[in-house]
């Protein structure tokens, strides 16, 4: 019987205390059989909070009125900026980036005859993001997408990093990585708002600024006594080695589902108002984070004092995707739309280390329809630099057409330009209807905005039949020359695990399975396109 340090039986997640991340509240789950009882933790000291009370050191928060009661406006010029009010300060921007979004351009200039921008009226929320998947030539989703392409700044909250889960790897059910949705807020006046995002079929793994609550819970350090289990925080949702006593509890608390981030009440500062402390530094030469800051949205200020130009979150999980994509012989690709609405535009990309080519299907794909196309040929293709510039133009224009403001479209392309456009491989990019995003990742903002626009782009890394053949050959090398086989898959970076999983579906290999277990548990950070 697994025993907690409090003396309670662990088997069904009794006494799972939440780890208190800096700037966040945790969650306490007290019963598996009878359902979860949620108890907030005080900001200073992590003690459970009594109803109607506030923990020592926890900042008081104004209540956000409902939409029918009108919007709560903060005093002009103060914006809830903490000590010293909202006095003007120099807001540090990175080289080539300014707060109006006119810095580094994705395409070297405007992609629209009439680029849109915030009109100065109304409470408006805009969001952009991308989801990444890997599919075999038959369209099968491949697992193993928890590896990172690029590091995030150290100030970003992360369930895994904060939990010091050394050597653990996420659930093998991960088939989709939701990457870098960022949410901007626009208002002509300062405003007090409340926001939360849910991920019913996944877990939200990284975020900034800090939240007041997150789900599913994590197990507190020193809460478990069990041979071989260190006295450290554990994550039942992301750690497959978590010591559940029963299958019932594993299914209830160990699945990638029920993700939630709640930022609680925070301030949308008056336009042009700077917080007492500038957002934390994220040098552009190290992080793509600052591209997303080059947008003329209002700054946000949390009760903790953290400030940022946007809300950021990432996650791991599964989706019911709108398109099924299959690779056929002779470079043919079939894309079938099973969703209730049209999707698109669709971009097909083919990139190697020196050249790149793309095709754009601007009409998208109607519901129930199929697009049959060919992978763009690299014969006579332009250099990677020239191709990336041309593709940046085209994608920026497509994003402009969704209703995003032009600086938002440029920020999105700049953030992902290297991974989308320059990483060798064959891939498809397509835009999904907002109804799909709202169903898959519900976002709730109070008071209700006058306009909410959410633009999600799906990035599909396609394993062609030729690549599958090469991977199977490399898999066979594990039995005769293991170093050669390992070198082949190691060169694939973050996609080594899904490519290896697909090869093992096509050809059994004991040595390949052993190598998979090693890379699945490794923490990797790969700079793509280099």
Image (cartoon, rainbow, N blue to C red):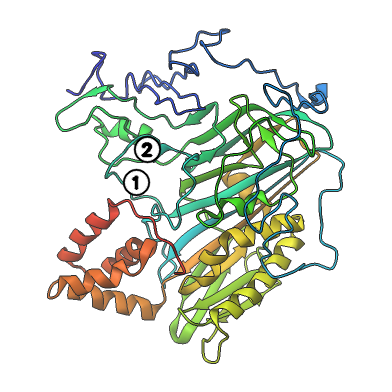
Question: How far separated are the C-alphas under marks 1 and 2?
Answer: 7 Å
Q: Is residue 364 visible?
A: no
Q: Which residue is drawn at 57% across and 35% down?
A: 209
In this rendering, the answer to whether 403 lies above or below 366 is above
Taking the image as shown, residue 138 lies to the left or right of residue 386, namely left
Q: Are marks 1 and 2 in contact (CB under 8 Å)?
A: yes
Q: In the figure, residue 4 lies in which quadrant?
A: top left
Q: Is residue 188 visible?
A: yes
In this rendering, the answer to whether 29 lies above or below 147 is above
Q: In which quarter of the image is the C terminus?
A: bottom left
Picture coordinates of residue 496 (x, y %)? 33, 64
Q: Residue at x 65, y 76 (%)?
A: 390
Q: Residue at x 49, y 24 (%)?
A: 25
Q: In which quarter of the image is the N terminus?
A: top left
Judged from the image, the secondary structure of the residue bearing numbered disc 1 is: loop
Picture coordinates of residue 527 (x, y %)? 43, 62
Instruction: Tell me the residue that label 2 is attached to.
Output: 237
Taking the image as shown, residue 359 lies to the left or right of residue 424, namely right
Picture coordinates of residue 315 (x, y %)? 48, 45
Q: Which of 233 and 340 is in front in this view?
A: 233
Judged from the image, the secondary structure of the residue bearing numbered disc 2 is: loop
Label ID, residue 171: 1
Taking the image as shown, residue 170 lies to the left or right of residue 21, namely left
* Of pointers 1 and 2, the one earlier in the residue sequence: 1
Q: Residue furthest left?
A: 480
Label ID, residue 409: none
Picture coordinates of residue 54 (x, y %)? 55, 10
Q: In the figure, residue 253 lies in which quadrant?
A: top left
Q: In the figure, residue 167 lies in which quadrant?
A: top left
């Amino acid at each position: 019987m697994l025993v907690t340090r409090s003396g309670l039986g662990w088997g069904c997640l009794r006494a799972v205390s939440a780890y208190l991340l800096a700037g966040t509240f945790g969650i306490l789950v007290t019963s598996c059989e009878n359902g979860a009882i949620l108890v907030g933790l005080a900001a200073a000291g992590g003690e459970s909070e009594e109803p109607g009370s506030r923990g020592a050191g926890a900042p008081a928060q104004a209540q956000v009125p409902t939409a029918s009661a009108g919007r709560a406006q903060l005093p002009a010029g103060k914006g809830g900026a903490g000590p010293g009010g909202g006095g003007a300060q120099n807001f540090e921007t990175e080289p080539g980036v300014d707060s109006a979004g006119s810095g580094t351009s994705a395409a070297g200039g405007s992609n629209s005859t009439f680029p849109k921008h915030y009109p100065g009226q109304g409470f408006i929320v805009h969001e952009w993001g991308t989801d990444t998947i890997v599919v075999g030539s038959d369209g099968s989703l491949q697992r193993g997408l928890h590896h990172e392409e690029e590091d995030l700044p150290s100030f970003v909250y992360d369930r895994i990093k904060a939990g010091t889960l050394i050597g653990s790897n996420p659930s093998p059910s991960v088939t989709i990585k939701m990457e870098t949705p960022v949410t901007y807020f626009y208002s002509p006046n300062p405003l007090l708002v409340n926001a939360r995002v849910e991920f019913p079929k996944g877990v939200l793994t990284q975020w900034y600024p800090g939240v007041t609550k997150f789900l599913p819970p994590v197990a507190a350090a020193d809460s478990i006594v069990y041979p071989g289990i260190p006295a450290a925080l554990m994550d039942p949702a992301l750690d497959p080695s978590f010591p559940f006593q029963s299958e019932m509890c594993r299914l209830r608390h160990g699945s990638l589902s029920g993700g939630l981030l709640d930022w609680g009440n925070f301030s949308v500062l008056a336009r042009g108002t700077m917080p007492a402390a500038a957002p934390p530094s994220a040098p552009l030469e190290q992080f793509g984070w600052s591209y997303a800051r080059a947008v003329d949205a209002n700054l946000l200020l949390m009760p903790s004092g953290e400030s940022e130009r946007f809300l950021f979150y990432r996650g791991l999980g599964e989706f019911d995707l709108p398109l099924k994509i299959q690779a056929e012989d002779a470079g043919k690709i079939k894309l079938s739309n099973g969703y209730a609405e049209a999707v698109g535009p669709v971009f097909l990309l083919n990139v190697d280390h020196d050249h790149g080519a793309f095709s754009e299907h601007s009409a998208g794909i109607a519901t129930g329809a199929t697009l049959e196309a060919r992978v763009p040929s690299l014969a006579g293709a332009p250099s990677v630099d020239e191709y990336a510039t041309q593709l940046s133009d085209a994608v920026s224009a497509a994003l402009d057409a969704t209703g995003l403001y032009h600086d938002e479209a440029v920020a999105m392309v700049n953030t992902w330009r290297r991974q989308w456009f320059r990483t060798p491989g064959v891939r498809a990019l397509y835009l999904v209807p907002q109804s799909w995003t709202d169903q898959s990742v519900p976002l709730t903002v109070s008071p209700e905005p006058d306009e909410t626009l959410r633009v999600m782009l799906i990035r599909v890394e396609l394993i062609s039949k030729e690549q599958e053949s090469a991977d199977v050959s490399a898999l066979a090398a594990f039995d005769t020359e293991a170093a050669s086989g390992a070198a082949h898959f190691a060169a694939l970076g973050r996609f080594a695990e899904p490519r290896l999983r697909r090869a093992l579906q096509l050809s059994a290999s004991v040595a390949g399975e052993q190598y998979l277990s090693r890379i699945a548990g490794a923490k990797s950070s790969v700079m793509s396109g280099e």
